[in-house]
Structures are given as structure tokens and as C-alpha cells.
Amino acid sequence: VADQWLHTIVHADMDAFYAAIEQLDNPELRGRPVLVGPKSGRGVVLTASYEARPARVGSAMPMALARRRCPEAIVVPPRFERYTEVSKQVMRVFRDFSPDVEAISLDEAFLEMTGAGHIFGDPAAIGRKLKEAVREATHGLTVSVGISGTKYVAKVASGYAKPDGLTIVPPDSAVAWLAPQPVSVLWGAGPKVQARLAELGLETVGDVASYGARELESALGKMGRHFHELAHARDPRPVVGSRTAKSLSSERTLTVDVSSMAQVQFYVRQAANVVARRLRQKGEAACGVRVKLKTSDFRILTRQRVLKRATSASDEIYEAAKGLLAEFRDPGPFRLVGVAAFNIHSGQDDGQIDFLAPQSAKSGRLDDVLDRVDARFGPGTVQRAGELLKRTVFDEHMNLDSLIPDPSDQE
Ligand SMILES: [Mg+2]
């Protein structure tokens, strides 16, 4: 059957990942409501175990509120190193099934499985085997799996029967399958948009599908068009896995050759900003940074380095590039300066849950602000504004707990 599908895309999402790991490692927590998050009342719940969810607690909720709603819950401080370790096991399993795995977060990924029917069987067999392999590799964790012909429908499907779900939506019945579901399953439809849709009398995805595309667009702008496409199960985005990895660069031939290190650094900073911004725009992050210089007599010199983890933060890419500059022995003068990012991954550093590196979560916030300033006032504003904004943004967000909810567990 799988071969009759034009595309086969799997979305796999671990169930209550952090809480499930705590229950796995500590048998006393099994079967009991567990909240992973800071013990103090401040900060938010990162993940609630399924036993806690009937009490209406979930991730991103203030811990104090969660404890009021579920007083019997056991609060466990997060152990990110352990979660990362288990994440690696899980991603390794995913890569056994497909060369194209697009990790969205520690516990969630898309797998491109088009044409894999002859190896793994039909979609139901693919799903069962994947779930079994994850359970075995992790010694008991469960994953919910959705399979369809587009990323969007696969993602909705994985959330449909959580926990331990397996939902297969054949592409030709995707529109009908989506129709009765609430508009909240539309990607990008937050509370405000949902309220707006309700004003238009649109409560289900089917309502949105049958509403005129033009009317929807005039009511909601570009978002309206986007929702209309999703409601018709149209989502052309490919799974961007490691096989499609590439590099991204920004280089500039200078009007006047430069040889002072300060000047070279200035152009490296500009190029790093451009590269980092483009990564962020595409929702990507890079593990490698390369600096390229061309001397006035046209010799091309390059130095590169692999980073400890993927990033799309301007500061981090610049710091790596600046470090590489020290390795060039040539005194110049130079006529071209460039920075490239390579080992590019999708969604590794989407700014939502980069809890592993507080520094980066903060500078990610900064980059968000700068991107907006940039879009509004033009590229020239950003560097000067950056120095001013840096102080403000860092001071306001000293409590990192507020920056690190696990959005994938808000089902
Ligand atoms: Mg999850």
C-alpha cells in the first residue's frame, strides 16, 4: 500500500519525554503524577506526566499554578544531560529507518519514508516497527507516531492518539480526516487567531476548508491563505534531513583592500550576521563555520571549525569566525572577506527550546529582536541598536525557566 502513496512522511513525538525519562529512571515515580520543572514556585512546568494531566496541568504552565491544581504531584528538577543522552538514542533509531531525519526538538522528528515500503512494509508496519525499536532502545519509552503524505498531516496525526499512539492517514483521505478537528490543530493558530476564526463562525478545520480562500485571506491576511492550504492538507515543505545538508555563505569583495585585523573583523562580523540571519529565517542551525579570505593577488585562504552544537545565533557564529581569523598567517592585504556556515540542520536551534545552552537561549531572544529591528529600520540600524538592546534583553530574562518550556508536549 505504501507504494501507492506519492509521499510517505512520518512524524514521531516522544510522550511526555522528560517526565517519562524520570519515571523510567526512578520506579517510585511510575504511575504517579510528575511535574518536571523548578522546585521553587517560580518558573514553568517543562513536562507533566500523563498521570498529572487530568488535573489540567501541562507544559509552559507556571509551576505555582500547576502545584495548586495538582497538589499530589511530585516535582522533579530537570536533568538535561540525561534527556540529551536519551534523545541521541532515539534519533539513532530514527536514522535506522531513514537517511532523512529532520529533528524538530530533542524528542520529535520528521522522517522521510517515501519509497521505503519495500524495506519496512506498509505505513502501519513502518509505524509499529518504529515504535517497537524506540521502546527497545530506550528500555521502555513510548513514542506517538503519525504517518501521512505531508508534514502537516503527519504532525497532527502523531498528536491524535497520544500517548503511545499510531495514526495512519492515507493522503487521499487526509482532508476528510482533518475536517472534524478543531481549528486549534492548524499550524500557527494561537488563541488570538482561534478567536478570530470563531468570529467568522469557523470552528473546525472542515469549516476553514469550505470557507472561501479569498474571504479567509481578506479576513486574516497571508495567514488566511496558509490556513486554507493546510485545511486542504496541502503542505509542500520537504523533510530537510542530513542528506540535504548544504552550506550557506556571505562574502563580499571590498572596494578597497584591507589588511588591518580590525577591518577584517568588521567585515567578518557583517558576514556572520547575514549568515546567522538567513539560518534563522529558514529555521536552521549550523554546526560548522568557515572563514574565507582572498588576498589582493587572488590567493584564496580558508579556515574552518566544527562547533560543539548547532547554532543560528549571530554572536556565536561571529565568535567562531573571529577565532578562525587568528589562524591565518597571511598579513594581507585582502580583497574579499566571507563567512560560511556548514553542517546545517533544520530546527536544531529554533529558539523555542534551546534549554541546553542558556547563553544561546538569551542571545536567541536578542537575535529575534534584532531581526525585527532590522526588518523595520534596515540593516544599518542593527549593530548600533544591538549593543543597546543586549543589556536590556539580558537583564529582563534572567529567569531562564520562563524561556524553556517544551512546546511539543502541550497536547
Ligand atoms: Mg513530545
Image (tube, rainbow, N blue to C red):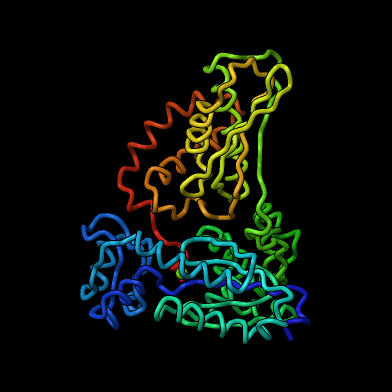
Q: Is residue 203 visible?
A: no
- Vertical order, 403 against 380 (above or below): below
Is 128 or 207 nearer to us in this picture? 128
In the rendered image, residue 98, in percent from the top left (x then y), is placed at 63, 70
Is 207 or 317 nearer to us in this picture? 317
Image quadrant where residue 8 sits? bottom right
Image quarter in which the N terminus is found: bottom right
Q: Is residue 390 visible?
A: yes
In the rendered image, residue 198, in percent from the top left (x then y), is placed at 57, 66
Is 272 or 404 nearer to us in this picture? 272
User: Which residue is at a point 66% across and 75% down the rendered structure image?
Assistant: 206
User: Which residue is at a point 48% across and 70% down the rendered structure image?
Assistant: 90
Image quadrant where residue 130 sits? bottom right
- Vertical order, 335 against 301 (above or below): above
- Vertical order, 164 against 216 (above or below): below
Give the number of marks. Answer: 0
In the rendered image, residue 407, in percent from the top left (x then y), is placed at 45, 62
Question: Is 25 positioned to the left or the right of 338 in the image?
Answer: left
Question: Is 76 positioned to the left or the right of 262 in the image?
Answer: left
Image quadrant where residue 51 sits? bottom left
In the rendered image, residue 111, in percent from the top left (x then y), is placed at 62, 69
- Vertical order, 112 against 392 (above or below): below
User: Which residue is at a point 38% across and 64% down the rendered structure image?
Assistant: 83
User: Which residue is at a point 58% across and 16% down the rendered structure image?
Assistant: 331
